[in-house]
């Protein structure tokens, strides 16, 4: 197993980590209802993906608690 020989400085650590960033999700338009949706996922408005209806488009904003 590789073990570092010396402690990596704070500036070198931060310089390396500066390249590791999150990217924004790519949005496409739904072919059925023209709403924006994420690629390779069912549309949140109409529930269709690749010409098939997978689920009813029901939004659940609040989670029910007991």
Image (spheres, rainbow, N blue to C red):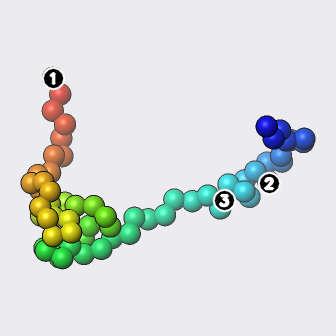
Q: From this view, report whether residue 28 is shown above or below residue 61.
A: below
Out of 50 and 55, give the one closest to the viewer: 50
Circle number at residue 22: none
CB under 8 Å between discs 1 and 3: no
Q: CA distance from mark 1 to mark 3?
A: 43 Å
Q: How many badges with numbers are in the image?
A: 3
Q: Is residue 32 visible?
A: yes
Residue, far top: 66
Which residue is label 1 attached to? Answer: 66
Q: Secondary structure at mark 3?
A: loop
Q: Is residue 43 above or below residue 59?
A: below
Toward which corner of the image does residue 48 lie, by quadrant? Answer: bottom left
Farthest residue, direction right: 5
Cβ–Cβ below 8 Å for labels 2 and 1? no
| Residue 17 shown left or right of residue 53 in the figure | right
The 10 Å Cα crowd at callout 3, few under 14, some 14 to 19, many 20 or more, is few
Q: Residue at x 16, y 46 (%)?
A: 60
The CA span between labels 2 and 1 is 50 Å
According to the picture, the residue beneath numbered tag 3 turns out to be 18
Q: Return the residue nearer the eye: 26 or 15.
A: 26
The percent coordinates of residue 7 (x first, y second) are: 86, 41
Quick one: label 2 or label 3, which is nearer the N terminus?
2
Q: CA distance from mark 2 to mark 3?
A: 10 Å
Q: Residue at x 13, y 74 (%)?
A: 32
Circle 2 sits on which residue?
12
SS of the residue under disc 1? loop
**Circle 2 SS class:** helix
Q: Quadrant of the C terminus?
A: top left
């Amino acid at each position: 197993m590789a073990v570092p020989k010396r402690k990596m400085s704070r500036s070198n650590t931060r310089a390396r980590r500066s390249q590791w960033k999150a990217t924004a999700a790519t949005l496409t338009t739904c072919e059925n209802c023209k709403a924006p949706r994420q690629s390779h996922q069912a549309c949140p408005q109409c529930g269709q993906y690749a010409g098939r209806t997978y689920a009813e488009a029901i939004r659940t904003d609040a989670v029910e608690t007991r």
